[in-house]
Amino acid sequence: MSRAVSLGDLDLGPGASREPVRAIATPDPSVPPVWVQDQRAGVRRAADLAGLPVVPDAGDRAAARAFKVRIPASYLSLIDWSDPADPIRRQAIPSAAELRVLPGERADPIGDAAHSPVPHLTHRYPDRVLLYPTYVCSMYCRHCFRKESLNEDDDRSVALPRLGPALRYIAEHPELREVILTGGDPLTLSDAQLAQLRARIEAIPHVRLLRIHTRVPVTLPTRVTPALVQALRGRLVTAVVTHFNHPREITDDAASACRRLREAGFMLLNQSVLLRGINDDPQTMETLVHELVYTLGAKPYYLHHCDLTRGVSHFRTGLDEGLALMKALRERVSGLCVPHYVLDLPGGHGKVPLGAHAVRGREGDRWTFEGRDGRLHDYQEQLGGPAAEREREGELGPTAERERKQELEPTAEREREDELGPMAEREHELGRERELERELEPGAE
C-alpha cells in the first residue's frame, strides 16, 4: 500500500529533479488519488512554510498570514532553492513586498463587483459572463488579481443551489453565448460537481461555448484524469484556457494533462501575465510561447499587463517595457505564437489591446486609452522598484524610447521611415538623383 508523500519525502535542494513527485500507483480504493496526495504533501497553510529548505523571514511570514498560501508538493519540487530570484519560487512563496501598497492600487482592480448583477457572476461584455463556482485554488499565486476577494472566502466550493440566481440570469439573457468558469479554479471541484454544473449550463439553449479558466494543468497536472475529462464533455464547444507563465512550468505531467484535454476535443488556449523578473525578457517569452504551441498544442491567447492589484507592484513592468517586449517577440516568432498584449482598464471598463491604435495620449506615467465603449480612459502607472527608479532618472535608454515612439507613430510614417528597408530607400534616393540630373540637362523644360 502506498502512502501520501510529504515535504520530508521531497529532495528540494538545488540539484532536485524538476519533474513532479509521483506517489506509487496502487489499486487500493482507500488510498487517495495522486493529485490529492500532492496537495496534502505540499504547503497548505502559513505554518507549513517552516518546513521548506529556505525558511521565509518575518516579513514573508507576515505576508503568508495576510494572504492565503497553498502550494502542491509537485510545484514546490520545481523550485531552485539556491536562487532567491527563481521564477517558480517568486510565483508561489509569499513575500514581504505583498504588504507594500501603492496609492493607485485597488482591491478589485478590474471592476468585477461593478458588473455583478447577481452573486457569483460577472457580466462585463455583451455575449459572455464569468461564473464563479468556487473560490478555491490548487495554488494561490502571489500575483493574483483576485487575491483579496479570494481571501474573503473560505476554502469551500459554492454549492450548486447557491448558483441558482446566476444560472437563472444566464437563462434569461439570450444574448449570452459563452459561460466562463473561473474563481478560484473550477478544476478543484469534484468530477461529480463539474458534471452536474456542465449539465445545468448546457441545458440553456442559447449558450454555445463553455470556457474554463484554470491553472490546474500548471500547478496540479495530475488532477486532469480521464474521469475529469469525461465530466467536462457534453454538447457545448469547450475551451480550456491554461495559465503558464514560465517555460519551467511545462513539465512532463503538464504536457500529459494538456494532451489529454486536446485529445478530448477541447480547444486549448493559454493566458499569461507579464511579470517582472519572471517572463519580461524576449528570450524567456520566446521559449514560453514556442513550448506552448509546439509542446502543449496551446495557442498563446492573452499576455496580460499586470493589473493594479494591491501589493503586486514588485511584479509589474512599465507599459513601455511591455510594448518593447511585444515588438521583439513579433520579430522572433510566427504569428501563431504571438499573444494579444492587453490591459484591463481599472474600474471595469474592459480589456484594451496594447498597441499604437489603443493609445490616445500620454503625459509622463499617465496614459490615455480608447476603451471598447469608444470613450477615453486614463491609466496611471504604479511602478515599484528598479523600473520606477529608471523612469524617474531617465535611464530606460534611447532604444526603449525610440521603440516607444515608433509604436505611437502613424503607420504611414513607419512605412516611410522604417519598413522600406535600406535597399528600397537607396533606390528611392538614386531615382530622385536621376530626376534632378534630367532637370539640369540643357533643353529640359
Image (cartoon, grey):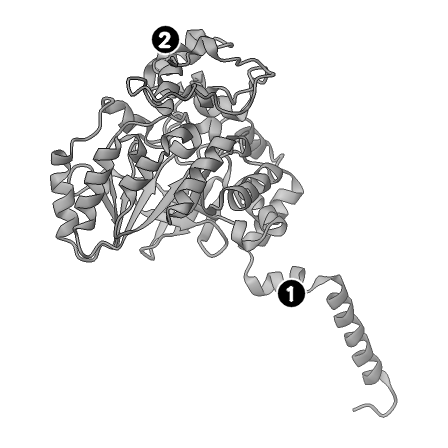
Corner quadrant of residue 134: top left
Tell me the quarter of the image containing the N terminus.
top left
Amino acid type, mark 2: Ala
Q: Is residue 368 above or below residue 357?
A: above
Amino acid type, mark 1: Arg
Left or right: residue 359 compared with residue 280: left
Which residue ends up furthest to the front in the rendered image? Answer: 27
> For numbered disc 2, what is the local secondary structure?
helix
Question: Dot 1, crowdedness within 10 Å: few (<14), some or many (≥20)?
Answer: few
Q: Is residue 14 above or below residue 357?
A: above
Residue labelled with disc 2: 47
Q: Check residue 301 in the rendering and tell me which mark sits there, or answer none.
A: none
Q: Earlier in the sequence, mark 2 or mark 1?
A: 2
Count of marks overlaid on the render: 2
Q: Which x, y percent locates residue 301?
A: 44, 47
Residue labelled with disc 1: 416
Left or right: residue 428 compared with residue 217: right
Identify the residue shown where x is 52% and y is 25%.
Answer: 19
